[in-house]
Image (cartoon, grey):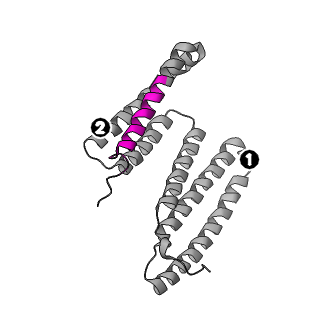
Amino acid sequence: MQDQGFMKSTIGKDFLYGGLVFLTICAFLGFLSNPATRDVIINNYYDIGMFFGIVGLGLFFIGIGARTPGVIAGGAIGSFIVLTAPQDALVRYLSLSALLFGIGMYGMIKSRNAVRVLMSIELMLNAVNINLIAFSRFVDPVQVKGQLFAIFILTVAAAEAAVGLAIVLAVYRNMSTVDMNKFNLLKW
């Protein structure tokens, strides 16, 4: 039986629609109850409009049969581009770093292929490097501590990739698979 995905089930749709209704109710209650919140919402109408536009576009594509993970990934990347474009440079770098770290975390958790897990770890390490360099550049531009840490992380990541790929190659030669669920060489 083919997996229909999270959004094809009624639980997934109820969860998404319930979340959207909750966010809408919170926005309107906040708008009506607090003048300070009303000012924040009015000043950020562009961000709020883009959020609901991206969610609406995602629901449209899911409704016509698009796969949910692709729609979520496209929405995350589109949200990153649209919502961080008018921001400061530091916010853009930190948002890019958070997006890359999230993609790496998802790949590490979701994938059972050892090579994909290693690639996801490398992506997470590169996200940390972007954070270090961005903070070093914008917080204290005279010091180069962030760049030194980034170079150190790059060398450790290169060594980790070499050793990790050597281990994966050795396991593949013995077991003819790189599926991490089938690795039981170190169990008692």
Which element type, helix, strand or loop, lies under badge 2?
helix
Q: Amino acid at mark 2?
A: Phe
Q: Is residue 35 left or right of residue 116?
A: right
150 or 161, which is in the foreground? 161
Q: Work out whether residue 59 can be spotted.
A: yes
- Dot 1 falls on a residue whose secondary structure is loop
Real-space Cα separation, disc 1 to disc 2, in angstroms? 49 Å
Q: Nearer the viewer, residue 62 or 36?
A: 62
Q: Is residue 12 magenta?
A: yes
Compared across the picture, whether 63 is left or right of 176 comes to left
Judging by the rendered image, the residue that carries numbered circle 1 is 142
| Mark 2 lies on residue | 60
Q: Is residue 155 above or below residue 173?
A: above
Query: What range is drawn magenta here?
Result: 5-25
**Location of residue 24 in the rendering, given as x and y in whole percent from the top left corner:** 45, 25
Mark nearer the viewer, 1 or 2:
2
In percent of the image, x 69 and y 53: which residue is there? 146
Q: Which mark is residue 165?
A: none
Q: Main secondary structure of the magenta part?
A: helix
In the rendered image, the quadrant that contains the N terminus is: bottom left
Query: In this view, which residue lies farthest toward the left?
Result: 64
- Mark 2, other Cα within 10 Å: few <14 / some 14–19 / many ≥20: few
Q: Is residue 18 above or below residue 162?
A: above
Q: Badge 1: few (under 14), some or many (20 or more) residues near its Cα, within 10 Å? A: few
Q: Does 63 lie within the magenta span? A: no
User: Which quadrant holds residue 56?
Assistant: top left
Q: Which residue is nearer to you in this view: 68 or 161?
A: 68
